[in-house]
Image: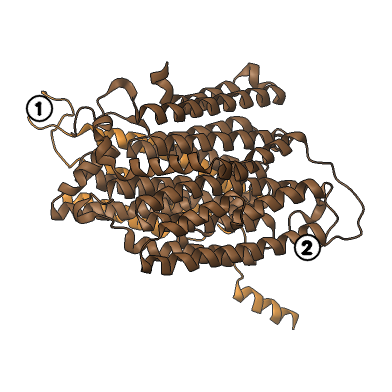
Amino acid sequence: MEAVYAVCVGLLTFSGIFLCLRGRTFPVVMGLTMLSYAVNLFLFSSGRLKLDGAAILGTSYTYADPLPQALVLTAIVIGFAMTAFVVILAMRARADLGNDHVDGRLPPQPETKTRRKKDQA
Amino acid sequence: MIEHLPILPVLLPLLGALLLLLPPLSASLERQRIASLVVSALTLLAALTLMLHTRAEGIQLYVLGDWQPPFGIVLVSDLLSSLLVLLTSVLGLAALLYACAGEDRTGAYFHPLILFQLMGINGAFLTGDIFNLFVFFEVLLIASYALLIHGGGKQKTQASFHYVALNLVGSSLFLFALGMLYGTLGTLNIADMSTKVAKLSEAEAVLARAGGMLLLVVFGLKAAMLPLHFWLTRAYSSAAAPVAALFAIMTKVGIYSLYRVHTVVFGENAGPLANMIEPWIWPLAIMTVVAGSIGALASPNLRELTANLVIVSVGTLLISVALQNEKATAAGLYYLVHSTFISAALFLVAGLISEQRGKAGDRFVMSRKVRQPALLGVCFFVAAMTIAGIPPFSGFVGKLLMLQSAEQGSEMLWVWPTILISSLITIIALSRGGTTLFWRRSTDKSQSDPASPWQVAAVTLLLLAAPLMVIFGGPMTEYTDAAARQLHQLPASLDVLLPGGPS
């Protein structure tokens, strides 16, 4: 179980970081979301992975640590708010700047330029 | 009532902001202005009382929900945090005063947002629990995201997306670090963590080290430490003047967290992890000062210049973290208070100058004469002298204390040239900028409105710190010495912080 869990968290983090490094706002927002999923799973595992463990004393033989669950809940709520904000901000940036690049301007594209020169010639 | 004092600097702005959003107050801007000024004055009063009370009675512990400390969340008001809460409240009041002149008209919800931001910053300073620190970071960040685009415009949107994306990645890293630290130490109470960290097994120590290093990255991002400082200039120079002034404290929240976590938890008493960030933070601190100085020389306008000077001050403060002794921390605290006030004042002065120079704004180009050359000239001159560290103002004392705190030869070899040369560069950049702003005039005779009394009051309030921190230098350094001692000798105050003993 631990290995599968660790691979999942690792894969999510990897995808999240990869997408965060993209140039357009939509992949970046997706990356941030994936990163927050990875974080939530990771936080959950910090209380150790247990099966059949209730978080209440005396109801089962082994019991789970309730604190990471509370932390994950807080992190999820905050993550929601932040994702909503960044989506709105990305839409506003698209409207204000006229493109969806994170720098607010598209990088120069060499192919189209050369073609234009040929047309002129 | 007095036992509820530590939570007042958090509760007052929160309740005030919520009331401002409700009908009787939300109806007109006039009412919002009066209410937010009253609330921030009350917060200032609470912060002042809290500081005096903490000074007289020792550390104040506020146990939220009455859950026993290592298990529940606590607010801790010690000398360091109460000083910074007071600093934040003064800064908040000045930003609101300045905004009352009309800056709050350019967008919605300015006053509630400033109050939410104050709540987040005060909470981050007061909390004694590292997860709670994360929560208050998020509160202050989401308010700052909205404040940064206050007024709208292309530049702000562009700077804002970088700022938001970087800080969201930072928040994720913060949570990764917290997960690692909780998984190894089993606690999130900062005082309790400091008792646990020396007892870790070898395998756990590796994980805790990774967690501590991640925290360095997160706090370095907030504080604008060298490779993570590129967002700062653009964000601060595009923000509205009162917002930029309030943001002057945001980098200091990162520095404060470094003091709190890396001095207390991973400090001298941390066993195998003792002073683990020291080899990293030395070069980074010095490079931050260098990067800020080069940026200051290259800045095309006063706001960008000020933003680069903020980076220089962050680098100087990181040096005090790197020196890692009581004297350096005390000097750092004095310098922190001084540099926050003065960089905030300089942002406000830049706002005034750009209002009075028409299209040229605060860019270093020839343009028409400012409407009130005497007033703005004096303000700019005092702020420039103070931030460059020329006597008789507080910058001189602050830099002198920093230089004195480097005791060993090798430390002096690095610290002295860095601070002195960066001061020289600051003087060059500011005098170059100042001469262009005030003396290179075109023949254009058109005039703009003079500064409103609100704006002058705000700038004066902040600039008063420069002479006052020298006149009351004795009590002030005594206070910072005591605060640094309290921070470095945490085991002495463990009885107060953990009344039930470590978990």
Q: CA distance from mark 1 to mark 2?
A: 75 Å
Q: Say yes or no: labels 1 and 2 on the same chain.
A: no
Q: Residue furthest left?
A: A61
Looking at this view, is B206 or B6 the one in front? B6
Residue occupying the point 32% across, 55% down: B213
Image position, residue B344 (x, y; %): 61, 46
Query: Which residue lies under the disc numbered 1?
Result: A60
Q: Which mark is residue B334?
A: none
Image position, residue B181 (x, y; %): 25, 46
- Image quarter where the C terminus of chain B lies is top left
Chain letter for mark 2, please. Answer: B
Q: Which mark is residue B365?
A: 2
Looking at this view, is B428 or B252 the one in front? B428
Looking at this view, is A10 or B389 the one in front? B389
Dot 2 falls on a residue whose secondary structure is loop
Q: What colour do you see for chain B?
A: brown
Q: Is residue A85 above or below residue B285?
A: above
- What amino acid is found at the position of numbered circle 2 in the picture? Val
Image position, residue B362 (x, y; %): 73, 55
Residue B225 seen anywhere in this rendered image of the structure: no
Q: Which chain is orange?
A: A
Image position, residue B164 (x, y; %): 51, 48
